Image (spheres, rainbow, N blue to C red):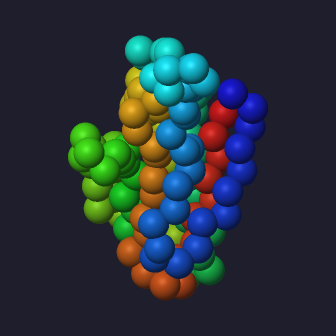
Amino acid sequence: MALQYSNITGNAIETLIAKRKVLNPTTGVNDITFASSIIKTITLCNIHATDDVIVDLYIYDATLGTYFILNNVTMYNGATLVLDRNDVLFDNTHYELRIKLNAGDSAVDVIIK
């Protein structure tokens, strides 16, 4: 996977990695039964000038549900958190990776390698 940089601000739910759809054009069926997302690391950095931020990072599917990687994790001002492949391996033919911050003025940089 190429590097992906995101500046996440506010408290809206943001999709970091969308669900991968690999459909057979003839049958309309997903031809890949398991395609793991290829992520080496996800780095989160609280870039707010003064405030801590509470982060939710999770995989989501409307039918299959929500599964948290981070749930209500407080990141202090200026703090950086690095998650490795073992922390974030998921099947992105079924799930998308989402992030949500706690406040309207929250700010986090996200780098996905």
- Res. 61 image quadrant: top left
Q: Position of residue 26 (x, y in %)?
A: 57, 20
Quadrant assignment for the C terminus: top right
Q: Looking at the image, which residue sits at the far right?
A: 2
Residue found at x 41% / y 29%: 90
Q: Looking at the image, which residue sits at the far front?
A: 26
Q: Position of residue 100 (x, y in %)?
A: 43, 64
Q: Is residue 70 left or right of residue 41?
A: left
Query: Viewer-proximal residue, 6 or 65?
Result: 65
Residue 75 visible in the displayed image: no
Q: Is residue 15 above or below residue 41?
A: below
Q: Is residue 51 above or below residue 4?
A: below
Q: Is residue 25 above or below residue 65?
A: above
Residue 88 visible in the displayed image: yes
Query: Viewer-proximal residue, 1 or 19?
Result: 19
Residue found at x 69% / y 27%: 1
Residue found at x 56% / y 50%: 16
Residue found at x 25% / y 41%: 64
Query: Viewer-proximal residue, 8 or 15?
Result: 15
Query: Viewer-proximal residue, 93 or 112?
Result: 93
Q: Is residue 26 left or right of residue 60?
A: right
**How many discs mark residues in the rendered view?**
0
Q: Position of residue 105 (x, y in %)?
A: 53, 84
Q: Position of residue 65 (x, y in %)?
A: 24, 46
Q: Is residue 35 above or below residue 16?
A: above
